[in-house]
Amino acid sequence: MGTPEFAVPSLEMIINEGYKVEAVVTQPDKPKGRGRKLEAPPVKEIALKAGIEVLQPENIRTAEFRERMEAIGPDLIVTAAYGKILPKTILDIPPLGCINVHGSLLPRYRGAAPVHWAVINGEKVTGVTTMYMDVGMDTGDMLLKKEVEITDDMTAGELYEILARVGAEVLRETLVKIREGTLERVPQKEEEATYAPMLKKEDGLIDWTRDAVQVHNLVRGTNPWPGAYTFYKGDRLRVWKTRVVDCDYNSTGADCADLGRNGVDRSNADGIVSNGTGTVPGTILEKRTDGVIVACGKGALALMEIQFESGKRMGIESCWHNFEVGRVLGQEKG
């Protein structure tokens, strides 16, 4: 049972290892793009290519779906990013239980978006945990874990791909131990639990009063979805890539060693960079070919890749000249 790309390596591993897959359960096809054409979940596409029956129930809590699962009679159910919590009526069907592949080191980051929130929160390490499922949200006994390093510039999308592959590896070892009867269950410590709720589009709004590292982490953690954004001259500006600048800027002034390199337009910048009288966070301090420098609540950030409203994603070297030094980002229209 799974839906997005995260689940694909796990399904492919199960197929390639020779396990008999009686059926794949995934969420219904959803409209996407400007044409709103129905698009199948990635897991469905893999299952159909392998000749596996695909079930796409709108509601998994109906008697009809329970009866269908009972008729299939699986020995074990494996889930990976399915997107719905299984009811007890389904959990009780397989004699070997239900195993979930979760993209965090439980009990930290339970919930729908563990990969994104780990990056947003500036974590240095995350990983994958396999666990026995119960009626709670990622609260069941833990089985196996594997850690993954999060580098300073890694995006949520890049981490997501890594964890998907690692998840398949951890699941392979978990299934072997189930066959051998050597799998050990470790209860989660509730006092150590943290949560990773589903992201909303508005979670990508940049708060320039936060420090530069926090804003940088938000940009990384919301890439590719929902995307970080601010406003420039009243229009939405998406920010896809940033760099923390070597700068002692704070709300009372700035001393930025990173400013003044080649390709700089310092017009109107001196009064903003060095006045020491309280620069507004979000102020464009400097524009240049390798980054548009923006003041944060503490420190400064270089915009490296952006997207103007109704425009395409582009590197800053293609559009740095369009920015106005002294303008404050984050101010919406009217």
Image (spheres, grey):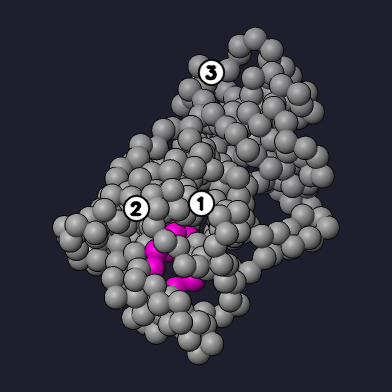
Task: Looking at this view, name the residue that lies furthest to the top.
Answer: 262
Earlier residue among tags 2 and 3: 2
Q: Nearer the viewer, mark 1 or mark 3?
A: 1
Q: Position of residue 171 (x, y in %)?
A: 34, 53
Q: Which residue is mark 2?
A: 171
Q: Residue at x 72, y 43 (%)?
A: 237
Name the mark on residue 258: 3
- Neighbor class of circle 1 (other Cα within 10 Å; few <14, some 14-19, many 20+) is many
267 over 305 or under it: above or below: above
The amino acid sitting under disc 2 is: Leu
Q: CA distance from mark 2 to mark 1?
A: 12 Å
Q: CA distance from mark 2 to mark 3?
A: 46 Å
Q: Which residue is mark 1?
A: 8
Q: Residue at x 64, y 24 (%)?
A: 291
SS for callout 2: helix
Q: Residue at x 43, y 32 (%)?
A: 152
Q: Nearer the viewer, mark 2 or mark 3?
A: 2
The residue closer to the viewer here, 60 or 199, is: 60
Q: Position of residue 41 (x, y in %)?
A: 62, 59
Residue 163 appears anywhere in the view: no
Q: Residue at x 48, y 22 (%)?
A: 246
206 over 43 or under it: above or below: above
Give the residues drawn in magenta, as a range.
Answer: 77-85
Name the mark on residue 178: none
Q: CA distance from mark 1 to mark 3?
A: 43 Å
39 over 257 or under it: above or below: below
Q: In the rendered image, which quarter is residue 96 located in? A: bottom left
1 over 102 or under it: above or below: below
SS for callout 3: loop
The amino acid sitting under disc 3 is: Asp
